[in-house]
Image (cartoon, rainbow, N blue to C red):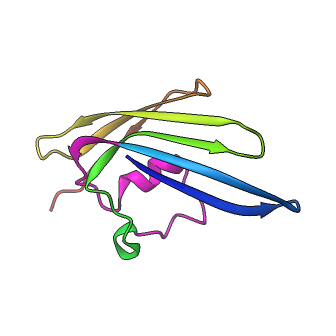
Amino acid sequence: MTKVVYSYRYLEVDQSRTDTRTYTSTTNRSYPDLNLFLATTAPTTKTKDLWSDQLGLRSTHLLSSFTEHFSHSGSTTKKTFAYKLDAKGRPTEVALSDSEDTPRTFIITYLEK
């Protein structure tokens, strides 16, 4: 489990966000790092070029859950992940459940040389 606290100022008010991540025992064989995409669950202009291994952020295991807590609103969101793997141990499907009741499934395909 990892816990990261971000402090920032928004609308002249000091605020913080606490991220807590837990991991599966499944080795992370995705590149670029699937964990970064799953933490945001949406590609944005801020993350589309982020390669985690260059920044020292790569996790050795796949995410099991991700929780965000915002100090200014007291709100908490939680996402949990379930994986289907191929014969090489790579994720081919990721089922996402979150505290907002918007389940999603991501299908991942690989190009073989």
**Image point (64%, 51%), residue name:** 17
Residue 73: x, y in percent? 77, 40
Residue 25 part of the magenta-drawn span? yes
Front in this rendered view, residue 8 or 62: 8
Q: Quadrant of residue 95?
A: top left
Q: Considering only vertical position in the picture, is 109 above or below 15?
A: above
Above or below residue 24? Residue 102 is: above
Q: Which residues are magenta?
A: 23-51
- Residue shown at the point (48%, 70%) measured from the top left: 49
* Image spot of residue 27 (x, y percent): 20, 49
**Relative to 1, is 49 on the left or the right?**
right
Please identify the residue farthest to the left as the structure is shown.
Answer: 87
Q: Residue furthest right?
A: 12
Q: Tell me which residue sits at (39%, 65%) in the image.
A: 57
Q: At 41% from the left edge and 74% from the top edge, which residue is drawn?
A: 55
Report if residue 48 lies within the magenta region: yes
Residue 6, position as x, y percentages in the image: 61, 59
Q: Is residue 80 visible?
A: yes
Instruction: Name the side, left or right, on which 83 lies relative to 105.
Output: left
